[in-house]
Amino acid sequence: MIESTGHEEISLSSLSSSDYDKLQELVYFLIDEFKKNGVNISLPSLRIDAFALDVMSKVQDIKKSSLTFAPEAGSQRLRDVINKGLTEEVILKGAMDAFLAGWNKVKLYFMLGLPTETMEDIEGIATISNQIAREYYTIPKEERNGKVQITASTSFFVPKPFTPFQWSRMVTREEYLEKQRFLNGKMKEQLNYKSIRYNWHDAEVTILEGIFARGDRKISKSIYDAYQKGCIYDAWSEYFKYDTWMEVFKENGVDIPFYTSREREADEIFPWDFIDIGVTKKFLRKEYDRAVEETVTPNCKMSCSGCGAATFQGGICFEAHTGNNNINC
């Protein structure tokens, strides 16, 4: 692929790259294989609390690029709601480790519109961005690698099937834009504002994501009609035809708020309920209730929560218990 395309970066994408126990070996192999071509290795999905400093340093040898961390939410309360299991102390330490290893560019990924979110939670995004920039300036000037650049990006939370938040409502386009404007204002109030850049995801694209994520068979004709009207290259902003999508939804009687901004009843039957993913709907509902209560569920490697996935006899929960033949999680 590198030979055919001329791309200058290989990105290892995963929900959590740090969980791959051969990560270091893989990264070293890619570096050795492609460093002569100046190809950069990107690790966008690493947990801050599990980031290997030696891997960071090895990647740094090729090309200085930014590191992407994903705190997801600006406050500890909201991180507990989404079961992130990440403290402010760990976030700041991870950023400092990166700075000391030679990085001066850090990307932070957050979501707006998370369940139970308050304006204080949103302001926390600006606050922690500023704190990370401040950490950099605690390094003696002669030891810094130029100026620091913190890029904070927010996307619009879309509740997905087979997750505890499949019952949650999605905020409307207007609500999202209000949150984005509020956060942009708070960013400008920070002491290290000149070191912080704020980017946000397009709200109109996210509305479509919400409809597609939780839609049923009734939206299929709208997708086909939009295609017939030229909605083909929607991933490219210059080709995205939001008005056309809204037009076909209206023509087909699709009630957008029904799929996006409506809180689901606990016993509602979902279009995807017939699919067996191992994890039970009862467990997901229990996790939803725990989220609302701001109660963190331990990682599967630490404690089994009885989600039901062990029935497939594979994955973390199965492998962790095969030694004692206890797979009845």
Image (spheres, rainbow, N blue to C red):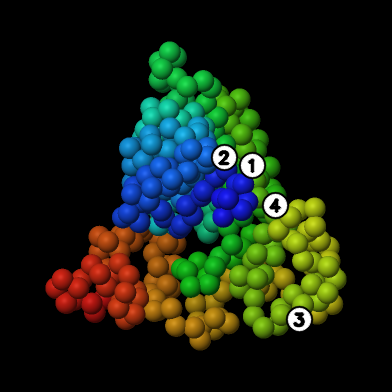
Q: Are marks 2 and 1 in contact (CB under 8 Å)?
A: yes
Q: Are marks 2 and 4 in contact (CB under 8 Å)?
A: no
The first of marks 2 and 1 along the sequence is 2
Q: Give the residue at x 74% y 55%.
A: 236
Residue position for label 2: 152
- Where residue 322 appears, x then y in whole percent? 20, 73
**Which numbered dot is residue 199?**
1
- Residue type at numbered disc 4: Asp
In the rendered image of this protein, does residue 329 appear above or below residue 294? below
The first of marks 2 and 3 along the sequence is 2
- Where residue 200 appears, x then y in whole percent? 65, 46
In the rendered image of this protein, does residue 62 appear above or below residue 284? above
The answer for how far apart the CA atoms under marks 2 and 4 are is: 15 Å
Q: Give the residue at x 50% y 34%.
A: 63
Residue position for label 3: 221
Q: Give the residue at x 14% y 73%.
A: 324
- Where residue 99 appears, x then y in whole percent? 42, 29
Q: Tag 3, which secondary structure? A: helix
The first of marks 1 and 3 along the sequence is 1
The answer for how far apart the CA atoms under marks 1 and 3 are is: 34 Å
Q: Are marks 4 and 3 in contact (CB under 8 Å)?
A: no
The first of marks 4 and 3 along the sequence is 4
The answer for how far apart the CA atoms under marks 1 and 4 are is: 10 Å
Neighbour tally class for label 3: few under 14, some 14-19, many 20 plus, Cα within 10 Å: some
Which of the two residues, 159 or 219, is positioned nearer the viewer here? Answer: 219
- Residue type at numbered disc 1: Asn
Q: Tag 2, which secondary structure? A: strand
In the rendered image of this protein, does residue 253 appear above or below residue 173? below
